[in-house]
């Protein structure tokens, strides 16, 4: 099956172009962000995420799809809206979020900064509401925007308790989706607890560039927004993620794609 092993430690990623020609394109993601060459861009000002629920709470279904734990948001019960900054006049809505992470703490993120990887990267996948749905939008040049938030391992992450409003509740739910294909309802995740910067993106420093989905079909439809500051994640959270299994009963850790050539693209910073 084309998806077998397709992300483990980068193994197999060279074969993606055989099943998805766009994976060989010239504007692929992720990339290494070289901070000495990024260009300051005041036009990125005003990026805003607003929430239907005042605490940024969402409901959805957490699935282990064999590649990444993915929370599909039940949008009719409230989601998040992304506007401004690099997005022009378009309005983007949050469709899902998922996690990339390493088998060890020294790797796991998809994007790297000056050659350094973080232990993980959370992707908040939004689509342009000028299209009827996420699937309609996903192959359009202005179809998607994904916010990437790095995860940095730290004992200072004080979120590790079974608190109903804290993000740890989401990690706790991962125990029920150990095997691929399993899913579980998530009834009250606060996006603001998961990544506090989402509530004040106007003040957050971020990198932005035009790129792609990091998995097949690798459509070059993503305006990437990579936040400079990571969220802290305890070793316990990383352990919970690494417990998730793929179809071959291996851990799905190292589910990141290696960095791709920039090919002259401009990376802006705000
Ligand atoms: O890897 C994910 C993939 O699993 C899926 O969620 C896709 C959206 O259809 O997004 C890519 S990514 O580019 O956000 N990593
Ligand atoms: Zn992703």
Image (cartoon, rainbow, N blue to C red):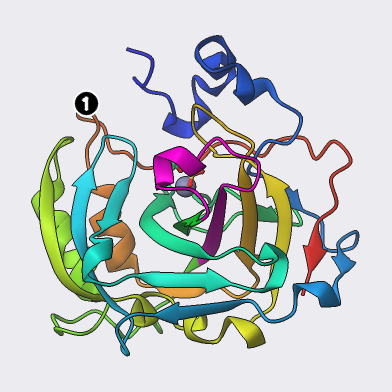
Q: What segment carries the magenta color?
A: 130-150
Residue at 34%, 19% (x, y): give it.
Answer: 4
Classify 101 as above or below 230: above
Q: Is residue 254 visible?
A: no
Q: Quadrant of residue 219?
A: top right
Q: Position of residue 78 (x, y in %)?
A: 27, 72
Q: Nearer the viewer, residue 145 or 167?
A: 145
Q: Is residue 1 above or below residue 149?
A: above
Q: Is 216 colored magenta in this rendering?
A: no
Q: Quadrant of residue 244?
A: top left
The secondary element bearing badge 1 is classed as loop
Q: Quadrant of the N terminus?
A: top left
Which residue is depicted at the point 18% across and 35% down? Answer: 180
The residue identified by callout 1 is: 247
From the viewer's perspective, tell me whether residue 91 is left or right of residue 5.
right
Q: Residue 2: x and y, percent?
A: 38, 15
Quarter placement of the C terminus: bottom right
Q: Residue at x 29, y 84 (%)?
A: 53
**In the rendered view, does 33 fall on the left or right side of 74?**
right
Residue 198's x, y, as percent?
49, 78
Q: Residue at 28%, 63% (x, y): give it.
A: 75
> Residue 143 lies in magenta, yes or no?
yes
């Amino acid at each position: 099956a084309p998806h077998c092993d397709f992300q483990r430690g980068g193994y197999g990623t060279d074969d993606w172009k055989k099943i998805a020609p766009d994976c060989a394109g010239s504007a692929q993601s992720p990339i290494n962000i070289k901070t000495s060459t990024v260009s300051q861009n005041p036009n990125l000002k005003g990026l805003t995420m607003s929430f239907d629920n005042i605490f940024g709470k969402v409901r959805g279904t957490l699935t282990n799809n064999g590649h990444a734990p993915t929370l599909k948001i039940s949008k009719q019960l409230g989601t998040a809206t992304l506007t401004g900054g690099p997005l022009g006049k378009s309005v983007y809505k949050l469709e899902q979020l998922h996690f990339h992470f390493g088998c060890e703490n020294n790797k796991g993120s998809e994007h790297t900064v000056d050659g350094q990887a973080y232990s993980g990267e959370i992707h908040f996948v939004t689509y342009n509401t000028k299209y009827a749905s996420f699937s309609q939008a996903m192959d359009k040049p202005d179809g998607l925007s994904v916010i990437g938030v790095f995860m940095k391992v730290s004992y200072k992450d004080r979120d590790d308790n079974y608190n109903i409003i804290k993000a740890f509740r989401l990690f706790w739910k991962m125990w029920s989706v150990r095997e691929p294909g399993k899913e579980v309802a998530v009834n009250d995740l606060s996006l603001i607890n998961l990544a506090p910067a989402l509530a004040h993106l106007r003040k957050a420093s971020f990198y932005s560039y035009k790129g792609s989905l990091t998995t097949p079909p690798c459509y070059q439809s993503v305006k990437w927004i990579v936040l400079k500051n990571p969220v802290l994640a305890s070793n316990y959270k990383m352990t919970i993620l690494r417990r998730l299994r793929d179809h071959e009963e291996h851990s799905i850790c190292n589910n990141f794609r290696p960095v791709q050539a920039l090919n002259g693209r401009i990376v802006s910073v705000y």
